Amino acid sequence: MSSISPDLGGDIKSSQNHFLLEPVSRANLSLSRASRNFWLYIDKGNIWSAAGVSKEPRNQAGNNFMLEAGQLWQRVSRENKKAGLKSEILSFVPAGNDALEIMQVTISNQGKKKVSFTPYAAIPLYCRSADNIRDHRHVTSLLTRIKIEKYGIKIKPTLLFDEAGHHSNSTVYFAAACDNKGRRAQYTYPTQEIFCGDSGDLEAPQAVFENRTPFKKPIQGREPMAAMRFSRMTLSPGAQVSYVVIMGISQKDLNLAALINKYNSRQKISACFKKTIQFWSAQSKSITVSSSDKNFDNWLLWVNVQPFLRKIFGCSFLPDFDYGRGGRGWRDLWQDCLGLILNNPGDVRKMLINNFGGVKIDGSNATIIGKNPGDFIADRNNISRVWMDHGVWPLITLKLYIDETGDFDILFEQAPYFRNHQLNRSKIIDYSWDDSYGTRLKARNGKIYKGTVLEHLLVQNLVQFYNVGSHNQVRLEGADWNDGLDMAKENGESVAFSSMYAANLAALAKLILETGRPSFELAEEIKILLAHFNYSDIGEKHRILEFYFSKTGQEVSGKKVRIDAAALSGSLEEKSIWMKKQIEKREWLKEGFFNGYYDNRKNRVEGRFAGVIRMSLVSQTFPVMSGLADPWQVRKIISNVLRYLYDKSSGGIRLNTDFKKEMHDLGRAFSFSYGDKENGSVFSHMVVMFANGLYQQNFAKEGWMALSSLYRMAANTDNSKIYPCLPEYFDISGRGMYSYLTGSASWFMLTLLTQAFGVKGQNGDLLIEPKLVSEQFKPGNRLSISRTFSGRKLKVTYLNPKSLEFGRYRIKSLKINSENFAIEPAPRLLISKEAIFSLPKNKLNLIEVLLD
């Protein structure tokens, strides 16, 4: 869906999965452009664009505009008083297996006289790689083969153009149209040249403006066009006519007539549209909230859909995202799983195990996800680089899965390791490797080596304990979460993510003991990483890491050793404690916040420099989230976030202060204009994680302030100019950018459910630990959240009759399906998995919690 354009005023009226934009005097949608249009050549030579692209004044008096939209559909209505016509264009992608988009155009006569017109449907078709917009656009157009059929056209380019090696093409692009009685178009214009004329003007096509029928011209090897002219239509007052246009892509040839036959009447479109609405409504309601702010509750339904869109489309499913070649990256893979786990963890188990097949034995990983489960690619651009934060996310995701299910056995499932030409965290290129080896690490016997999921987690987190720079913090390498910190590969360090690796080591130490197993079988090479020595000795760390790399570079021995659980847990805990103390001692600044980075000149990045405060939200978020920061430090951090990063004009928390200079020894981010992208925008993902960390440390009021600030910015449509969603970031003016790209949607739902409402799993049991603030209850005293847990549908309702603030209430009483349960008043309550399993599956189970 395209974003609302800058000059669109008016308020969005929201219902559960639908919003309505009232008629406004200044209206224009960025989606209403020549890329898709429906023209009317009205008798007496008047021309009207039903999609809003025309030469008439945009704000002509008497013309009305209306936008209605729901989850993955929209309806644009325009009325031309002078012509006496109204157009209504419904656009949606149908739920089901057909890879196409439907555009239904309805033309109504709103006047008192008959109106005659000739309608045209016009869809430009590009039909090749986006790379060819810049390179070889004309040459690749010569590959197009156009086939005109009864209801439209199909285009199948002969080759996939690639100078490194061309390939045969099997992809078919198509568009077709008919009226509401299933009648085909009278004429088809198969190329842009034939439809637009020599000018190529899609906003003033010659065929429409000169009322021309198609003329004979070569059609092969030209820029294709799905333009179709229907027979002249006369509408009496009050009458209407509909036209259906479908457009899509297929990986094999298809029967176009049979396909459009599925959508060739109003009844069929109506049934398909209803099915699509029901499908996305069901997806959006996996987690629902009922509060006094219905706009917030309804906005959440849109946010809850975003993880599904990322799973389907990856990072670049809209052309305006400007996100390279798109696809799903390593971080996306694990963070998108968060939302999927909360909705249906049973379906995610196999996916999680497959995901560990992307881990490399050097602790790094493949960075791009292939088309099939368990398929990985080293890098989309064949660049040897490593993101140092990538080892953090798998454990966080897997721990959520274990908490939700109690499935500790997943730790002992077997998974391969990814292998390619990049070794030792991309420091070395193995020129002996080629595709014939495959992408799975092998043992010396030539067989693919597999280790447990636990072993993979140990590799990811232990390697980073040794992979440190001159300040004994984990090396920044290619970048961390902040992709814009990409110019400190040699000497940069990330203190922020050092704190997260320290937290992960502690979490693994605890998890190992919770399994109840006395020992574990691991690759013998892992023992190298369990050494005990003076951890302040950076040189010794490097020697141990290089020795490990020398034993695992091209292959592993394949031998396993059994390691005592208590000893393994103790080694991890010892290393975690040392890392935390190191950060506490050296990185807390007198200014009252943490330094998070060292640049490529080995200089500290944050603090006060020549009177300029340099502070990053990332650098505060992870010490808080990891539990490294003491409560007094958290309070000081909050104070300085409000002082230096909070933007009063927008109500958002910025990613960093204005450093007032470019940082070529740190990254490209500081060469961006301030307030955009990774240089000082309100970056949703980091704000959500900051809120998550605050909640974890029981700073609930401040956590809600951070979390709700994003909703308020998104809902302020005069500034955000977006459909309901959580965008990747808000720019300096408060406009939402990269609307459906962000993985912050999963984190938002996770934080709201498990931290604010405190309805979460703990090793398979249900933990109820609310951290709701009094503001959320106003003006009433009741809040509820619905979710599925252990296959049971639950609605948890909190009653706060005294409007008590968090920290002043305890759980006083509990009812499940109206039955009272005796409990001791406490801030948290654990309901056993057995009790949950005893609840009926086929009904909504009501849990009522009294706070007092």
Image (tube, grey):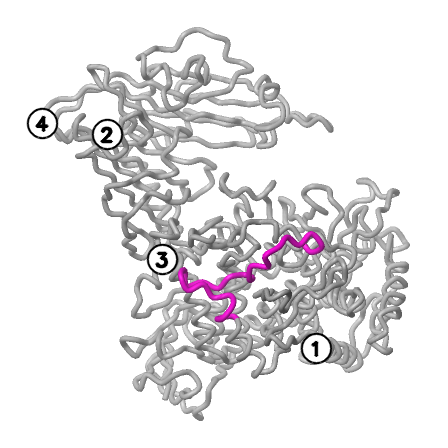
Going by the numbered disc 1, the residue's amino acid type is Lys
Q: Distance between the residues labelled 1 and 2?
A: 67 Å
Please tell me whether residue 695 is drawn above or below residue 182 in the rendered image. Answer: below
Please tell me whether residue 76 is drawn above or below residue 491 in the rendered image. Answer: above
Please tell me whether residue 642 is drawn above or below residue 430 in the rendered image. Answer: below
Q: Do the residues labelled 2 and 4 touch (CB within 8 Å)?
A: no
Please tell me whether residue 570 is drawn above or below residue 670 in the rendered image. Answer: below
Quarter of the image holding residue 115? top left
Q: Count neighbours of disc 1 (C-alpha within 10 A) and say few if under 14, some if 14 to 19, many if 20 or more.
A: many
Quarter of the image holding residue 397? bottom right
State the residue lying farthest toward the top.
216
Q: Count neighbours of disc 3 (C-alpha within 10 A) and say few if under 14, some if 14 to 19, many if 20 or more.
A: many
Q: What label sits on residue 580 in the rendered view?
A: 1
Question: In the rendered image, which residue does mark 4 sit on?
Answer: 112
Most common secondary structure along the magenta stretch: loop
SS at mark 1 in the image: helix
Q: Distance between the residues labelled 2 and 4?
A: 15 Å
